[in-house]
Amino acid sequence: MNFLKENIAIALSSIKANRLRALITMLIIAIGITALVGILSAIDAIKNGINSNFTSMGANTFTIRNADINIKVGRHGRAAKPSKSITFKEALKFKKDFNFDVSSSVSTMASGSARLKFETKKTNPNIQVFGGDENYLITSGYELEKGRNFVAGEINSGSHTVIIGKDVETALFGKVQAINKYIKIGANRFKVIGILKSKGNSAGFGGDKMCLIPLTTARMYFGNDNLSFTINVLCKNSLLLDVLLNEARGEFRKIRKIPVSGEDDFDIIKSDNLATMLIDNLQKVTMGATIIGLITLLGAAIGLMNIMLVSVTERTREIGIRKATGATQAVIKNQFLIESVVICVMGGLIGIVFGIIIGNVISLLLNTGFFIPWFWIIMGVMICIFVGLVSGYIPAKRASELDPIESLRFE
C-alpha cells in the first residue's frame, strides 16, 4: 500500500511539473469518456422517457386491436397483411358483455393527417383525429388540463364537441382562451370543450398533435368500409391483469366466432409490452453508439500513449538518476504505469461529469427528471483504468529498459 501511495505521489508531482502537457492529455481522455458516457447516458434517458410515458398509460391496461397475419409469398418468404378489421358492432358487444371490474373504451383513428382551423389560423395537416367514448381518456392515460370530458349523451347523439391536444391549442389559439370556441375539422364545426395535458410526441404516437371527438361523430363523418376499432381495458386491480387479459381473449374469440382450434385474428397487447418493444429496438442503437464511443476513446488512448512516449524521452535523465540510486526496472515501469492511470482517471472523471450533464439535458428535454447513471460512472472509471494501463504499458516498458549510464548522459 505504501508503495502504491508513493508512486501516486510521484505521479501527481510529475503532473504538477508538466501542467500543460498533463492538462492536454486529460482533455483527450475527457473527450473520449464524454462521448462514451454521454451517448449511453442519453440512451438511458430515452429509455426512461419511454417507460414513464407508457407507465402514465397505466401498467394495468391492455389493448385489443387488429392483428397482422402472415401469408405466403411465392415459394419463399412470408409477408404480413392486416387481419379482418374489428367492427364497431364487435367492439360494442365486447364492452357490453365483459362484465368484470374494469373500465373499457372503444375508439378509432378517424384521420391521421387532418388540418384544423380557427378563424384565420390553421394547423399543419398532421393532426390525428381520434373518435372515442367517455372512458377513452381514462383507459389511454390522457389527462385534462382544462375543460371537461365527454358525457354519455354527447357520445350517443354524435355531438360536435372536441377535446384538443396541447400542440393544437398552441397552433390555433396561442394565449387566447380555447374553451367554448369553435374550430373546423374538415368542413365541420366543433366546439372545444377540453384541453389535454402535454404528453410529448415521441415514438410516432399521438401525443399532443391530436384531437378527440365523440365516437358516433367520427363514424358519421370519417366512417368507411376499412374503419377499424380498438378496445382499451383498464383493470382496477393490477394483480388480476393477466387473468382478465385471458378472459378478454376468450370473450373476444367468442364474439368473432373463432373455432377452438383456430388462431387468434386479433392482438391483445399490454401497455408495458409496447414499451418493451421500443426499448428492444433501442438495443441496436445502443450497440452502434457504444462502438462510436469506443472508437473515440481509442483515439484518446493513442493520443495518451504518444504523449507518454514523449514524456519518457523528456525524462530520460530523471530515469537514469532513479536507476543510479537503486530503482529497479519494475519500479520504473510501475511508476510510469501508475502515472498513466492517474492522468487517465483524472481526465475520465472530467469526462464522466460532462457525460452526466449531456444525459440529464436529454432527460430534462424528455421530462423524465434528473438521474445519476451509476452504472456508466463505474464503467467509465474502470475503462479509464484499463485505457491507462494499455496506453502506458509501452512507454513504461521503454522507460524501464533504458540504460542508466546512457540516460545520465542524455541532454
Image (tube, helix red, strand yellow):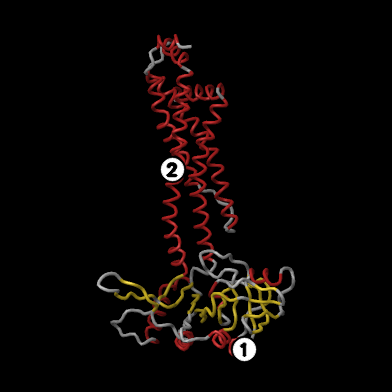
Q: Does residue 1 lie above or below 65 as drawn?
A: above
Picture quadrant of residue 243: bottom left
| Residue 289: percent from left, percent from top | 45, 50
In this figure, which residue is indicated by the disc labeled 2? Answer: 294
Q: Quadrant of residue 284?
A: bottom left
Considering only vertical position in the picture, is 187 above or below 274?
below
Toward which corner of the image does residue 369 lie, by quadrant?
bottom right
Which residue is the site of mark 1? Answer: 153
Tell me: 218 left or right of 184: left
Q: Residues within 10 Å of mark 2 (few under 14, many from 20)?
A: some
SS label for mark 2: helix
Residue placed farthest to the right in the image?
176
At a point 48% along the width and 27% down the height, the residue shown is: 307
Q: Nearer the viewer, residue 43 or 382?
A: 43
Q: Which residue is depicted at the point 62% across and 80% down?
A: 185
Label 1 CA crowd tier, 10 Å (few <14, some 14–19, many 20+): few
In the image, residue 44 lies at what x, y percent? 49, 53
For badge 2, the amino acid type reads Leu
The amino acid at mark 1 is Gly
Q: Residue at x 43, y 60 (%)?
A: 281
Element on which disc 1 rests: helix
Q: What is the number of the mark on residue 206?
A: none
User: Which quarter shows the N terminus?
Assistant: top left
